[in-house]
Amino acid sequence: MTESTIYTTLGCILKRSVTLKTLTHFAFIVFFFLPSCTISLLPDYDAELHDGLNQANEQAQTLFSALRTGATPGNFSKSEPMYHKTIGQFAALLTRANTRPEPVFSQSMAERLERVPRISEACSALREEAESSGKTCSGIVTPYALREIVETLSKLRDAHKKSGIGPLTLASLIGDYEISIEQALTIEAALK
């Protein structure tokens, strides 16, 4: 087969494939799907929430640094104001994240996806897990991550007050905190 024969064959295939039906499909895609590409599935970027996360993270890291020098019940009173300030700041950020409106299309898309049997099963399992632990299930990660941070810092505070914190417990709770703060910061930075 020569090169000119190949081009002639391709030309015939292309001419035959461009039919009225193909043009109709193309027009349908252009007029109905392209405008939907501008629909947002995520909430708008909140600069104050993102800045607040960075500031609260800095406070938490300062708290962790102070605790690494020793966390006994005897020195809890020295750290107590820092615990309250840090937990309070994360709780305020949680309130802000919870009140940020979720896009309407995102909610309707989730409802449509739940009609698919396998997705419905997964969503039901997640919903049951969330309800049993007293948490809400949302498509937005930041509120969930902030709730985990408040719980982790509260556990840290309570353990420090009651019996002190050993190095392994401290490392474990800091690890839990790191996972949650990285999730929240990553999502909020991506929204920017």
Image (cartoon, grey):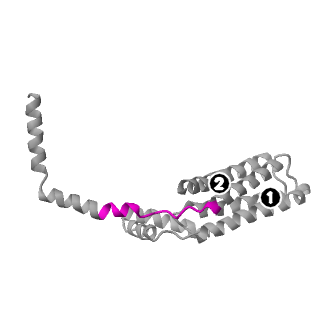
Instruction: Determine the image quadrant of residue 181.
Output: bottom right
User: How much space separates mark 1 and mark 2, taking CA atoms?
Assistant: 21 Å
Whole-percent x, y for residue 73 in the image: 88, 57
Q: Which image quadrant: the N terminus?
A: top left
Please give left or right for residue 183 compared with residue 113 in the image: right
Disc 1, SS: helix
Task: Work out which residue is located at the far top of the displayed protein and give it.
Answer: 2
Marks 1 and 2, the one that precedes in the sequence: 1
Q: Is residue 36 magenta?
A: yes
Above or below 93: residue 74:
above
Mark 1 vs mark 2: in front: 2
Kind of residue at disc 1: Ala
Residue visible at 60% across and 64% down in the picture: 143
Q: As rendered, which of 59 and 5 lies closer to the eye?
A: 5
Residue visible at 12% across and 35% down in the picture: 7
Residue 181 numbered tag = 2
Whole-percent x, y for residue 82 in the image: 82, 59
Please say whether residue 158 is visible from this viewpoint.
no
Residue 159 numbered tag = 1
State which region is magenta: 32-49
